[in-house]
Image: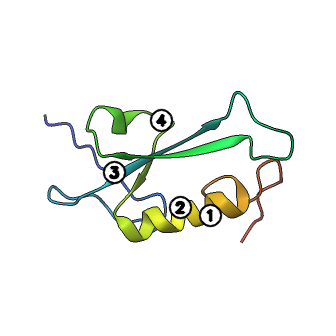
Amino acid sequence: MAWDESFICNICGTVKLESNHWWMITLGNVLCFDEGQPSRHFTLLPWNEDQSRNPDVYHVCGEGCASKALERFMSSGNLDGTKVGSRAFAG
């Protein structure tokens, strides 16, 4: 029995295929930051099969979704568009 593992873009929902050129994103807390500055960081990494299984890694299918992820992070501090520390909205 073969193990089927698939990855889905956290921004648009596209399923990863063999030839896709995907990226990974990690978000984390900045340990030292100045008052009034963002306390989180956004890191974009080339696809790595082993690291892609980490539950703290976001998957993006290309440049467009990576840009959208950065835009969301810059406006809200996360990738789902809700402000960090705020309640997620239904809808």
Q: Amino acid at mark 3?
A: Phe
| Label 4 sits on residue | 55
Residue at the spot of label 3 = 7
**In contact (CB < 8 Å): disc 2 and disc 1:** yes
Res. 28 mark? none
70 on left or right of 13 = right
Residue 44 in the image, given as x and y percentages of width and height? 44, 48
The numbered mark, 4 or 3, whose residue comes first in the sequence reads 3
Query: Label 4 sits on what residue type?
Result: Pro
Task: Find residue 18 and report its horizontal and vertical position in percent.
Answer: 15, 55
Q: Nearer the viewer, mark 4 or mark 2?
A: 2
Mark 1 sits on what residue?
72
Residue 58 vs residue 66, the one in the foreground: 66
Q: Gap in Å between the C-alphas at discs 2 and 1?
A: 5 Å
Alpha-carbon span between mark 3 and mark 2: 16 Å
Residue for badge 2: 69
- Dot 4 or dot 2: first in sequence order is 4
Q: Is residue 6 visible?
A: yes
